[in-house]
Amino acid sequence: MMNREELIAFEDEVAARFNAGAIRAPVHLYSGNEAQMIEVFKDVGRNDWLFCSWRSHYQCLLKGVPPDDVMAEIVAGHSISLCFPEHRIYSSAIVGGVLPIAVGAAMAIARSGEDARVHCFVGDMTAETGIAHEAIKYSRNHGLPIRFIVEDNEKSVCTDTRSAWNQPRLSFEGQRDEYIHYYRYETRYPHAGAGVRVQF
């Protein structure tokens, strides 16, 4: 498993390439949550499935995708939709798009008896949507082998999530159980891009 310094160095390299114009498609970078992600991946098995949003570089690296393969996909313009089926990783740029797919995968695992689990990563704003609440409720009520990781960077694009919903505390804030793993972090990067080059 990659360590904190290696994860940071990878994202810094993506940022440098993006700002130099070598990556001509959107990128969404992680920063400041390396320790939390390494902790999350202590409970991710080799046969487990990962479903992610548009920010999934760390998930791919920590699941074991070779860094050169991840970088090649990012440079090719696929940063926001990284998919490595051989490693059981799927990402989507559609808000909430992976949630029903993740639940379906968990249902298939439950029915087949396979020794595997699903880990579904969602941002703080996605976690407040109806589809997230339905997916989590259905999974919990049916005892599905799935965990939802709520990653709270306190914003949705450029909007503060708590202000948008006029609620000082998010629905899953501070929750940690079999189905929810919530953590909060502060990133040094904007929602998209690396803070230098204009994206569009």
Image (cartoon, rainbow, N blue to C red):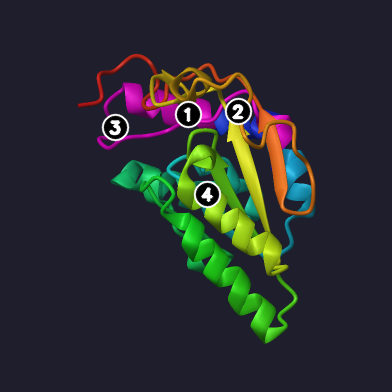
- In three-dimensional space, the C-alpha distance between marks 2 and 4, rounded to whole angstroms, equals 29 Å
Name the disc covering residue 22, or none: 3
Q: Amino acid at mark 3?
A: Ala
Earlier sequence position, callout 1 versus callout 4: 1
Membership of 35 in magenta stretch: yes
Q: Is residue 112 left or right of residue 30?
A: right
Evaluate if marks 3 and 1 touch, with contact meaning CB atoms under 8 Å apart: no
Q: Which residue is mark 1?
A: 13
Q: Which residue is mark 4?
A: 132
Residue neighbourhood size for the residue with mark 3, other residues' Cα within 10 Å, grouped as few (<14), some (14–19), many (≥20): some
Q: Amino acid at mark 2?
A: Ile
Earlier sequence position, callout 2 versus callout 4: 2
Relative to the observer, which residue lies in front, 32 or 167? 167
* For discs 1 and 2, the disc positioned in front in the rendered view: 2
Relative to the observer, which residue lies in front, 20 or 191? 191
Write the residue at 69% across / 64% down.
141
Q: Magenta span covers which residues? A: 11-36
| Residue, far bottom | 112
SS class, disc 4? helix
Residue 90 seen in the current view: no
SS class, disc 2? helix
